[in-house]
Image (cartoon, helix red, strand yellow):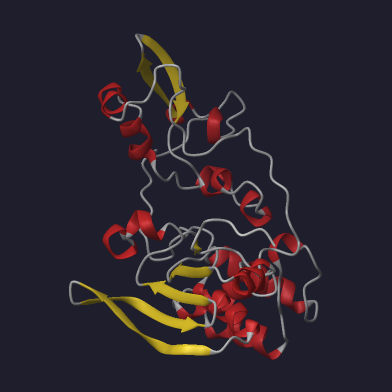
Amino acid sequence: MVKYPIKGMLVGNGATDWDFDVSPSFPETVYNFNMIGKKQIDYFRENNCTYFFNDFKNHTGPAGCNSVWDEINIITGDMNWYDLYRKNYDVLGSFPTDQANKPLVGRENPERLGVATINGEEKTYTRGFTMSEYTPWINHLKNSAPEKEVVLGFSFTDYLNREDVRTALNIPSYLQPYEACSSQIRYNLQEEASLWIYPILKAAGYRALFYSGDTDGAVPTYGSIQWIEKLGWKSLKPWSQWRTDGQVSGFIEKFEGLDFVTIKGVGHMAPQWARKQAL
């Protein structure tokens, strides 16, 4: 076995086992956050309804699960999927329409286009990102009404494309303006996800730390706890609080080969939204 000169790895809110992550853990998560009713979660529990990411395998339960699953997705459809408790700022207002009165969305929308001056030349870029642009490979986001999608990172994109900011960051003039998401990347879904790598890392003596922003709806903490339990590794330090400046920042449990850490009150981009705690 080749030994690489690294001590370990960090993974943040990573989809690891499709039997638990994303869709299977979503109903319990949004119920625990008081976003769906007891009627929906009781039906799911009593009928063993389980849906899987991008339908890569058939859901379990009777046909009635379909209508309840649709209800859950409709109820939560306007939430910020990457942080269920984070406010959505509708910075674009109403969407302009084309000649057929069809909303102009995504990169078609002229309000989404910004202009950066680079080396005296004006270049356009897409401002911010929608959830379906950030993760174009998630099927159920494609099915939502695009004109209702919230644009995230709008001001951040504008800031990074300011001429003085590019100069301060020593960004060369031959590089294009910054965009949060690339429309050029093509993705492939790996059905085995990434659980397989953890036993290999453990056997090779590498350390692993998995952290989870606990308000993430995309890869919920609830699912991460389940695949970690599935590993069956011995617990070396029980579930306990960790703190920053005297305040509870989350919880930690240490296992053989893996430290599991939650970051309290933030979602999928935990280091971005809780910088001090995450660092």
- The image quadrant where one finds the N terminus is bottom right
Tell me the quarter of the image containing the C terminus.
bottom left
The front one of 76 and 213 is 213
Q: Residue at x 53, y 42 (%)?
A: 147
Q: Is residue 2 left or right of residue 89?
A: right
Residue projecting furthest to the top: 120
Residue 14 position in % (x across, y down): 56, 63
Give the number of marks.
Answer: 0
Name which residue lies at 51% across and 79% down: 31
Q: Quadrant of residue 40?
A: bottom right
Is 180 positioned to the left or the right of 157 in the image? right
The picture places residue 5, in percent across and down from the top left corner, at 53, 56
Residue 2 in view here: yes
Q: Which residue is pictured at 45% across the width and 17% down the height?
A: 174
Query: Would you place residue 188 above or below residue 73 in this image?
Result: above
**To which quarter of the image does residue 123 belong?**
top left
What percent of the width, then of the height, locates residue 64?
A: 75, 78
Using the image, determine if residue 218 lies above or below residue 155.
below
Q: Residue at x 48, y 41 (%)?
A: 129
Q: In the displayed structure, does residue 101 sit left or right of residue 210? A: right
Image location of residue 168, percent across then percent down:
26, 28
Q: Nearer the viewer, residue 21 or 23?
A: 21
In this view, the residue in front, 100 or 232, is 232
